[in-house]
Amino acid sequence: METRRIAAVLRDETIGGALLLAATLLALGWANSPWSGSYDALLTTRFGPSALHLDLSVREWAADGPLAIFFFVAGLELKREFVAGDLRDPGRAAVPVAAAAGGVAVPAVLYTLVNLHGGAPRGWAIPTATDIAFALSVLAVVGRRLPTALRTFLLTLAVVDDLLAIVIIAVAYTGELSVLPLVGAAVPLAAFTVLVQRRVRAWWALLPLAVATWALVHASGVHATVAGVLLGFAVPVVRGEEAGGPRAGPGLAEHFEHRWRPLSAGVAVPFFAFCSAGVSIGGLGGLADALSDRAALGVVVGLVAGKAIGIFATTWLVARFTGASLDSGLAWVDVAGLALLGGIGFTVSLLIGELAFGPGSARDDHVKVGVLTASVLAALLASVVLRLRSRAYARIHQLETVDDDRDDDDDGGPGRPPPGARP
């Protein structure tokens, strides 16, 4: 069951990565075309009820609205991993959790060092986030024969990475805090929690409560995407005792994840990319000018070098000095490839850049160039490293295929009926 779920997640995120790339290229093309003024005019168009603090531009709606769906799915995934997934087992979780922590700490330190004197230290968190959709898309391009252990390690690392990014956004990038709306958000959130714990699935009952929670969190000054995470955490992962025991089967989290992940990966995240990635580069001269900004340079150093050093070094230290170990299907060159792949930072990196420097500002545009440049470099370097093991991956893939065929036979698949079945 867990293997099938991971495979389904990987498929959704890979398709989402392709749509994300298409939206990014469209935004870049439009922003660097003769019609770039219409792109800027579209993004600055404002609409929404001002009485509810929701008179936002299209760019702000993309970051605060649809992206909350992405964080809702992230919340569902995080809770599932901690309750019923790989992160439930401390032994299995130790290595990817430590790798994710190292992959957040080292990039932040390197960015801060680059921006220590006369730079832009407020953007220290920009290079800490890995974009799982883009990373999995690169894996799909590198080859379909990559071992399951490699993909699972990346997915688990990305889940913890998302959790750390959520905490950073909530703590470090909350402006003026309004306590009353934040306290008020607890009421619809509590009602939502009660209903989902009672296995209520009706959208007409849950959606208004979710929207109310989101609106109140937004009005409080905390970034509205945090509401998506809180709502995701409220959803039960496994069935209750009335359904035959706490481990009787999947709960609402899997149901909601199945329903909302396509909307997140196929609509919400590409829409955010379209509204955030469109930066006017201005040729090689403009690219060089953008990368001369210490904020952009810190992002490139943090994502390309910081992620690789942080993930690989932390993984090695944990495996060397604790009882934890790598999966038997992974070699250290695989960890090096995944560490480089962790330098693909896009969705959350762009969001933190906007929170740090303001959407549409000159420095935010430079940060976008830095994120795009670093992500391309990280993808190319990771592809080269992972390609070195293509023959070994082909052998592992063949062994996994044989094992899957045996499992199908035992379950009554194409090979033979299940044990005890009548002929």
Image (cartoon, grey):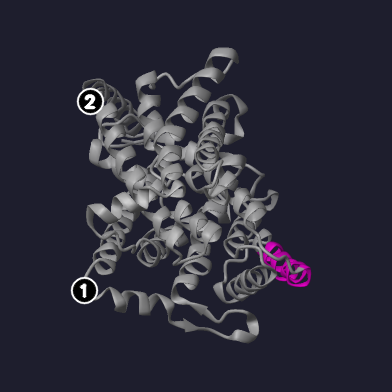
In this view, 314 is above or below 113: above
Q: Residue at x 52, y 30 (%)?
A: 99
Secondary structure at badge 2 equals: helix
The residue wearing badge 1 is: 34
Quadrant in the picture for residue 273:
bottom left
Say which of 62 and 212 sits in front.
Answer: 62
Left or right of 180 on screen, residue 125: left
Residue 186 among magenta residues: yes
Q: Are marks 2 and 1 in contact (CB under 8 Å)?
A: no
Q: Position of residue 261 (x, y in %)?
A: 44, 58
Q: Quadrant of the C terminus?
A: top left
Say which of 113 and 238 sits in front.
Answer: 113
Say which of 285 and 219 sits in front.
Answer: 285
Q: Residue at x 42, y 50 (%)?
A: 293
Q: Position of residue 68 (x, y in %)?
A: 53, 63
Q: Alpha-carbon neighbours of circle 1 within 10 Å: few (<14), some, or many (≥20)?
A: few
Q: Position of residue 240 (x, y in %)?
A: 67, 50
Looking at the rendered structure, the kind of residue marked 1 is: Pro
Looking at the rendered structure, the kind of residue marked 2 is: Ser
Q: Residue at x 55, y 72 (%)?
A: 203
Residue 414 among magenta residues: no
In this view, 176 is above or below 91: below
User: In the rendered structure, which disc, 2 or 1, sits on the residue that comes first in sequence?
Assistant: 1
Quadrant in the picture for residue 194:
bottom right
Mark 2 → mark 1, Cα distance in angstroms: 44 Å
Q: Nearer the viewer, mark 2 or mark 1?
A: 1
| Residue projecting furthest to the front | 118
Left or right of 198 on screen, residue 5: left
The residue wearing badge 2 is: 390
In this view, 224 is above or below 385: below
Secondary structure at badge 1 equals: loop
Question: Which segment is the magenta one?
Answer: 179-195
